[in-house]
Image: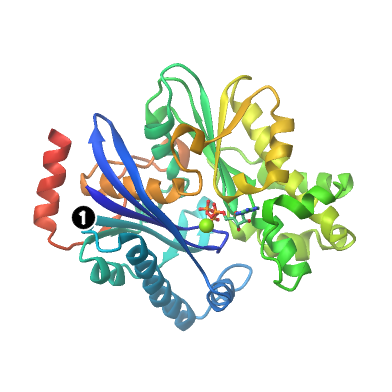
Amino acid sequence: MIAIGLMSGTSLDGIDAALVEINPRGASYAFELIDFGTVPYDRETVDALKSIMPPNDGSTSAVAHMHHHVGELYAEAAARVAGTRKIDYAAMHGQTVYHDGERAITLQLGSPYFLRDRLHATVCFDFRSADCALGGHGAPLVPYVDSLLLTSPDEDRIAINIGGIANLTFLPRAATPEHAIAFDCGPGNMLIDAFLQERTANEKTFDEDGAIATRGTVDRAALDRMLADPYFFQVLPKSTGRERFGSQFLLAEHAAVMQALTLEDGAATLTELTAVTIADAVRQLAPAGCAVLVSGGGAYNTSLMKRLRERLSEYRVETTTDMDLRSDAKEAIAFALLGYETLRERPANLPRVTGASAQAVLGAIVPYEFDSLGRRVQAECAG
Ligand SMILES: Nc1ncnc2c1ncn2[C@@H]1O[C@H](COP(=O)(O)OP(=O)(O)OP(=O)(O)O)[C@@H](O)[C@H]1O
Ligand SMILES: [Mg+2]
């Protein structure tokens, strides 16, 4: 099956599209990444999205407008990787604009119909709502895919995705998905990005290769203050987002300490916060020696990876690319696989991870020649 998985995360950097060939293999999948691309959000889109996201509160008309606009951008991102190829189905995450996991409320925007019309293919979307309807956080969902693709028969592993938020999946050796432990550890790149954007009036939107943080010194007092945030002490299940670790974390809650720091020291302190909270989460769960497989944009931040390696010196810190799972494409690939689970009607949430009361088939479907697609899925899964 030729599929496109589409993801735009909390960083608001853009829409990732992965063109993949997927084939079911027993309980798991064989897949090949054919092409991958990111369509960056332009400044206007980022500003419009931020205006409807916490700590802001958008009007109904602004939300409706962005639902339409993001839908068009998803279609554009998919069309670029599809080229002239015939696509069997696409699976889109949508743009999260609100997430309150504890109350089982989450919202992803992006009308899926533009995508169907552009690709002439069935589209799976709205992956989180089914879990929320069962009282779950609707997040994280990628641990299920981590479990299918990254579990090893002979070693414990930890998968860490450092996007806007950092999340972690512990995969005990030879375990099936329901044995995975996963949660959002806390900020990934989000605070570093927000700090630089504010200090440079958006001239810098992220700390490329961690160059600014590398030149700075960690301010211990500011770090300790931020490490006292109640989220880090919350029991599982837990998930988080821009609501907690957005710009207000820096501009309101920790304004006094952060404003006193230089650009370099502020970036170093926030990079250290991400590294320390990830490393603490790893130590809580995984025995020394186990493989720590990093993915997401944070894997490109040299300062962050150096700090993480220092704090996890008795672990093997690698990237998922080392395991043949390209680290920047991982989340988009994951949604392509979750789309297949929707089509074959196999539950893909992990109640132990999300807090839902039961397993659920995730996702809604916008059909296109759906009869024949359904028959092919059934044949592939039986074969
Ligand atoms: N070369 C780089 N150097 C430093 N940081 C980088 C680099 N490339 C990407 N990043 C960081 O990664 C972020 C984007 O990461 P990614 O796309 O994985 O996150 P996301 O879109 O928030 O997805 P999600 O939250 O779902 O994981 C950027 O905003 C930036 O902070
Ligand atoms: Mg992204």
Q: Secondary structure at mark 1?
A: loop
Query: Up-down: is 165 above or below 11?
Result: above
Mark 1 crowdedness (10 Å alpha carbons): few <14, some 14-19, many ≥20 = many
Q: Position of residue 170 (x, y in %)?
A: 52, 30
Q: Ligand 1 closer than 8 Å to the CB at disc 1?
A: no
As drawn, the residue found furthest toward the bottom would be 61
The answer to whether residue 134 is visible is no
Name the side, left or right, on which 383 lies relative to 179: left
Name the side, left or right, on which 122 lies relative to 269: left
Name the side, left or right, on which 323 lies relative to 56: left
Query: Up-down: is 206 above or below 347?
Result: below
User: Colour scheme of this structure image?
Assistant: rainbow
Name the side, left or right, on which 11 lies relative to 213: left
Viewer-nearest residue: 34 or 290: 34
Q: Position of residue 23 (x, y in %)?
A: 24, 39
Viewer-nearest residue: 105 or 370: 370
Q: Amino acid at mark 1?
A: Asp
Quadrant in the picture for the C terminus: top left
Query: Residue at position x 77%, y 65% from top?
Result: 252
Query: Residue at position x 37%, y 33% from top?
Result: 148
Q: Position of residue 298 (x, y in %)?
A: 62, 48
Query: Up-down: is 22 above or below 61?
Result: above
Residue 358 location, quadrant: top left
Residue named by callout 1: 88
Q: Position of residue 168 (x, y in %)?
A: 55, 38
Query: Up-down: is 14 above or below 320?
Result: below
The answer to whether residue 156 is visible is yes
Q: Give the number of callouts.
A: 1
Query: Residue at position x 55%, y 77% from top?
Result: 48
As drawn, the residue found furthest toward the front would be 84
